[in-house]
Image (tube, coloured by chain):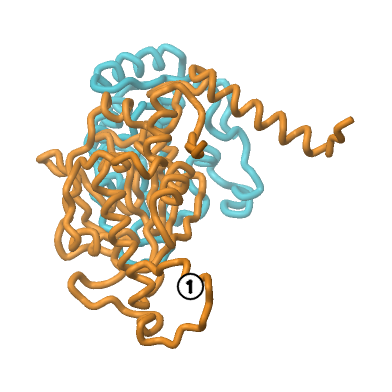
Chain colours: A cyan, B orange
Amino acid sequence: MTEARYPQCRIVPVRILGPDTAERLLNAVAGISGIRRLMINGPSLPATVPYGPARGKPNPNTNRTTITVGDTEVKLRVQVGMVTAEVTDASVIAHIKTTCDGIFTTFPYQLQEGQFMKTQPTLTDYAKYGPHADEAFIGLTDPRRKEPPVIIQGLH
Amino acid sequence: MAYTPQYGPGTSIVAENRRNQMNPNHDLEKIRDVTDEDIVMVLGHRAPGSAYPTAHPPLAEQQEPDCPMRKLVKPTDGAKAGDRVRYVQFADSMFNAPSQPYQRTYAEMYRFRAIDPGTLSGRQIVECRERDLEQYTKLLVETEMFDPALVSLRGATVHGHSLRLSEDGMQFDMLQRCVLSNDGVVKYVKDQIGVPLDREVAVGKPMDEAWLKAHSTIFHSLVGTAYRDDREYVEYIQRIHSLRTKYGFMPKEE
C-alpha cells in the first residue's frame, strides 16, 4: 500500500468550480512535476435523475461535461469542489501554492496539508478489487464505478 | 390590554427580519414580477391554462352537514372548488439566504391559511389546495423572501443548502433547474422536480451581497451576522434550554 512518506495536500476553493476553472486548475496543477496522484472530489452530477417523481429521466447539466487535461479527456461526473494531490516532496506543495495563487484571483482558496488518501484497503476495497489490487488506485476511485481512473498524459 | 405578538427575540438585523417575515401586518417588499403562468410552469403540477383537476365536487354542490365549525371557518378558494392538494418545496442556502426552513414555516403559518408545512434541515415543503398554492408561491417568489441565486424551488433532489456556492454564486443543484444566463438573470430550465420546461422562466437577477446580508434570516459567523453577537437571542435560547432541561427532571415547587 502507499507509504505515508509522500506528502499530500488538498486544494479547497471557497466556491465549487465550474468546468472551465476546473480545467485550468487541473492543467496547471497536473503540469507540475513531482505529482504522483491526483483526486477530484465534489458533489455528484448524475446523468439521470436519481430519485423523485422524475427518476430515471435524463439530467442535462452544463457542468457535467468533458474537460481536457494535458492530452487526456476527463469526463466530469462531479462538480469540482476539492483537488487532492500526493507529491514526491514538500517543495512541490509550495509550487502548487504558487500556481493556485495565480488561478484563484476572484475568490480565495485553502491549501491544506495532511494525509487525505487511504493508506490501506478497506473491506469494501477488498471485496471490489480482490487481494491483488493495484495499491496506487485504492481509495482514489468510487468502488461502485466500473470505469478505471484516468491516466493523464501529454504534460511532461 | 390587547395582546401584541412579539414573534421572536433578538436585537440583530437577522432577528428583525425574522419578525418582519412572520408578522402578517408587515408588508413584504416586492422585488420582482413573475407571471402566474411562470409559477404554474415551475411548480409542474398542471399545464398552464388547463383547468384545476379536482379531488371532490365543489362545496356548493355538496350537502354539507350542519356543523358549527364549518360555519365558523370559511373555506379557502381552493377548498371551495375542491382542488387537489399539491406542494411547493424550497431549498435555502445557508449563505445568507433571505429565508430558511423553520423561518418559512413560522412565516407561512402566520400569513397563509389551510396549509400543511413540513420542515426539514435544508428544505421546507408546504402543501395546500392547488389554486391557493399558486397564490402563496407567487408571494414567496416575488417578495423579499426569495433570492434567485440562493433560494430555489426543488420538489426532489434538494441537496445543496449547506454546500459551498458555485463559482457564479448559485446554490449547488444536482439537477441544475435554474441557470444564471449571460445577461445576469436566473432562469428556470426545469420544473421543480427536474423535468425540462418548454421555455425558460426568468425569476430575476440575484441580489447583491449587501442586500442579502441586510435581509438574511439566518445567522452565519463567516458571511453574515454571528449568532453570538445577538446577546438577547442567546439569552433567550439559554433560558429555553435551561427550562427544558430542568423540566426533564420534573421539578416540584416547594
Residue depicted at 33% across the width and 67% down the height:
A57
Q: Residue drawn 30% across and 44% down?
A: A74
In the drawing, does residue A126 fall left or right of residue A153? right
Q: Numbered disc 1: what chain? A: B
Give SS at disc 1: helix
- Quarter occupied by residue A68: top left
Q: Position of residue A17 (x, y in %)?
A: 30, 35
Query: For this view, does B77 lie left or right of residue B196?
Result: right
Three-letter code for the amino acid on which mark 1 is drawn: Arg
Judge whether residue B218 can be spotted in this image: yes
Give the farthest residue toward the front. Answer: B1
- Residue A113 locus on image (x, y percent): 49, 19
Name the image quarter holding residue B130.
bottom left
User: B232 or A120, which lies in front?
Assistant: B232
Identified at 49% across, 39% down, the residue is B2
User: In the depicted view, which residue is nearer to us: B237 or B123?
Assistant: B237
The residue tagged 1 is B70
